[in-house]
Image (tube, coloured by chain):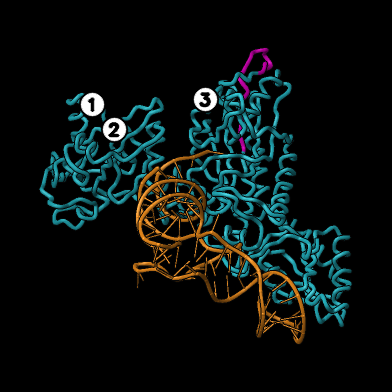
Chain colours: A cyan, B orange
Amino acid sequence: MRWSQFFIPTLREDPADAEVVSHKLLLRAGLIRQLAAGIYSYLPLAWRVMRRIEKIIREEMDAINGQEFLLPALNPKEVWEESGRWTVMGDNMFRLKDRRGAELCLGMTHEEIFTSIARHELRSYKQLPQVWYQIQTKFRDEQRPKSGVLRVRQFIMKDAYSFDVDQAGLDKSFEDQRAAYVRIFTRCGLKFSMVEASSGAMGGSASNEFMVKTDAGEDLIATCESCGYAANLEKATSKLDAIADEPSALSAPEEFPTPNVRTIEDLINFPGGAVASRQIKSLVYVAKTEAGEEQPVIALLRGDQQLHETKLADALGATEVRPAHPEEIRDLMGAAAGSLGGVGVKQKAKAAGRDLRIVADNALRGRTDMTTGANKDDHHLRGVDIGRDIEVDQWTDLRMVASGERCPVCEAGTLDVAKALEVGHIFKLGTKYSVSMGANVLDQNGKEVPIVMGSYGIGVERIMAAAIELHHDADGIVWTPAIAPFDVVVTVTNMKQQELKDAGEKLYRELQAAGLDVLLDDRDERAGVKFKDADLIGIPFRVTVGKKITDSTVELFDRAKKESADVKLDEVVARVQQLALAGR
RNA sequence: CGGGGCGUAGCACAGCCUGGUAGUGCGCUCGGUUUGGGACCGAGAGGUCGGAGGUUCGAAUCCUCUCGCCCCGACCA
């Protein structure tokens, strides 16, 4: 490809709208342009990168017997109603009507459509397992598109689905996918962690996310460098040092006045108060059940720890939890936030004919001589023994893990909590869709059983963006060879000098003949401009055809290492070929 | 959806408070010089000031409504 003919609209300055690095560089290097919020056009450079990523994905999917499909993005309402997700997906689904008034949607994912094919065509266990996939555009009406290509309303996804007779088959299919994902992300040059995750609205038993640590990410994950433990913060746990409590001096909690004490911090500093780890933090929440009913709940944590709301929701089996409003708190507890506690509230609620759940974090188990709110404004209780004084309905893990805490698995390591970007997610779906949609096969005993399914997704542009987040410098993008838009750029420093021009053209042909994707910078620009642009778009290797041509010598520049070496003309093709193909 | 910010030339921005008929840098076109890390000189082209309505002799500027985009939060296979 000749640069003079190729569309690479580079920008000298950072666009005002871009915040994260990948967004700025995708724009500046001429890879993408925005059409509307969360909707981007992929220009030739980006599309080349994405096609290379897709090629890697296809190779790895095919290697585990995946079969590529292409399903419609435009779906009728009926299929989605069968699975119940026409309502579950809510406002996140783009919906439209055809000229007859029939309702349609744009696909957010394709469990339903693949399942509908499976139920019509798969009859016998002998046809299983099947692994079906596609690389296709998905639509989600995100409430807040952001960060360039990282959170968008239209994007390309590889989604795969496995169909097995039984759980053991699913376990095998899941493992195949997991291994394929590891190879895919590794080949794309990403440093990633596979983490345990909550399976959320997808349903099913197990779910793992593939996360790339970067500040541009929106999730938080905890990782242990020494043993490799990794989990989404919504699942992560850690080991805590036990706290040695004095046996309670009091036979019952003792109330004491604490004027103007509202926070854990206030109570630490209050004479006669307590250190944070000796306090019980009492948070009033309202949980929404699947039936849409609201139920009040008190979450109890150690004073020095934070609640993770998803953990609370998961523990309660609630679809949603929210902090209670001040009026609700007053009504329920008889005091304002700042003087709340779990002592006696159960009985009080019962007496008032109300149900109130108390959920406590494991770290509070067996603690004695604690201090907590008295449910009376400006008063607290000391000498609280949890087992004796608080009627806990459920003990569970509620607390948010923090950096520096000890790894729950290996003991030796400490956890690091960091922002991360989800590039892939694999689920064991089980029979959720096959049951609701009637996708059954006959097993070896002639008995009709629902197909056991798995679902596996990868975001293509997220891989591209994550690669940039991970591999860039002040001059621009640094593509790893496997997903670079070109293997090498040949930079002719001055096209007006015939000798340089001829040498460049010749090299261009030879490199192409060697099987490489070559970009020839034949523009009538000054050398400095060409170098800057080449650095910006991040081609892994640059061959500079310049004044040393009189010595039959060119320069070979390594974009990642920022090192330049003189190479004889007759050796350069082999050198580049070796370097570029080694990285593919 | 809640909070904040911004829409002026292809890009980045000034002008708005205090109303008087639109400007700077980069980019673009033409001519010349230059030619290894985003050159220089000269001459040009390019703007319904997001849109609608209002106030006014006069609106980019003031008022009302509206559309769009960005950021924070909530949300999110």
Q: Nearer the viewer, residue A18 or A207?
A: A18
Question: Is residue A230 among what the camera can see?
Answer: no
Q: Are marks 2 and 3 on the same chain?
A: yes
Q: Which of the 4 image quarters holds residue A329?
A: top left
* Disc marking residue A296: 2
Is any part of residue A394 visible from this angle?
A: yes
Discs 3 and 1 carry the same chain letter: yes
Q: Chain of mark 2?
A: A
Neighbor class of circle 1 (other Cα within 10 Å; few <14, some 14-19, many 20+) is: some
Q: Position of residue A433 (x, y in %)?
A: 58, 25
Q: Is residue A457 left or right of residue A574?
A: left
Instruction: Check the image and report above or below for A324 versus B40.
Output: above
Q: Of the residues shown, which amino acid type is indicated by label 3?
A: Gly
Marks 2 and 1 close (CB-CB < 8 Å): yes
The image quadrant that residue A69 belongs to is: top right
The structure residue drawn at horizontal position 65% and vertical position 24%, both measured from the top left corner, is: A116
Q: Nearer the viewer, mark 3 or mark 1?
A: 3
Image position, residue A393 (x, y; %): 30, 31
Residue wearing tag 3: A84
Question: Tag 3 or tag 2, which sits nearer the N-term?
Answer: 3
Q: Nearer the viewer, residue A444 or A143?
A: A143
Query: Where is mark 1, residue-wise?
Result: A354
- Give the letter of the chain under mark 1: A
Region in magenta: A441-456
